[in-house]
Amino acid sequence: MKKETYKDFVYLKIPKEKFEEFLQIARDKGKKTKILSVDDLLEFKYLYERDIEHKQISASEAHRRKKAKKDIQIYQALEKWLTGLFRSEFERINPYKLSKLAKVNYRTAKRFWEEYNLDKWITEFEKSPNEALKRFKIEELAESLVYGK
């Protein structure tokens, strides 16, 4: 079947007990009788739509949580790098180094770098690391901190 043909159907989610009950009623009365009422059909259609909507909301929530955990992991690596004792003053961090420090994929570190505009923040980190880290955490990572916990 093509994907377009699925639009021609109405999908229902019928609990197994109800379905067996309807089959038993049909067997008792004969096959020509009407098994489901319109109210039953509307109820089952609503249950199906609610279930699909819940799955979509749950998937987006899971994506937000996963992204938040990675953001916090990268932030902690950035914090360690900025406050580290063995860091050279002339050494600048880039997305590749950040990905290695945080032990995340390079694409994830690059997305973090671009999303939070770390090119701008790096100059502030160099001036006063502790102040800038606190501001960065409050201004940029507030949503990730809420979802990551």
Image: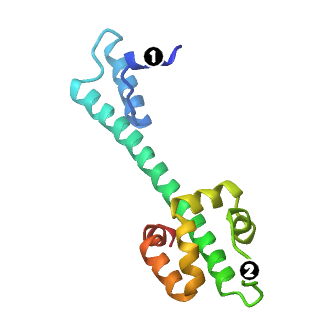
Please report the residue visible at 72 percent of the width from the left and 84 percent of the height from the top.
89
Q: Is residue 11 above or below residue 93?
A: above
> Any mark on residue 100, and which?
none
Q: Which residue is identified by label 2? A: 90
Residue 51 is left or right of residue 121, and the answer is: left
The answer to whether 117 is drawn above or below residue 40 in the figure is: below
Residue at image position (55%, 87%) is 128
Q: Residue at x 57, y 80 (%)?
A: 125
Residue with the mark numbered 1: 4
The residue carrying pointer 1 sits among few (fewer than 14), some (14 to 19) or many (20 or more) residues within 10 Å by Cα, namely: few
Amino acid type, callout 1 = Glu
79 is higher (above) or lower (below) than 31: below
Disc number lying in front (2 or 1): 2
Left of 101 or right of it: where is 131? left
Q: Quadrant of residue 112?
A: bottom right
- Up the image or down, 82 lies above or below 95; here it is below
Q: Position of residue 93 (x, y in %)?
A: 69, 71
Could you say where residue 69 lies in the image, as x and y percent from the top left?
A: 57, 66
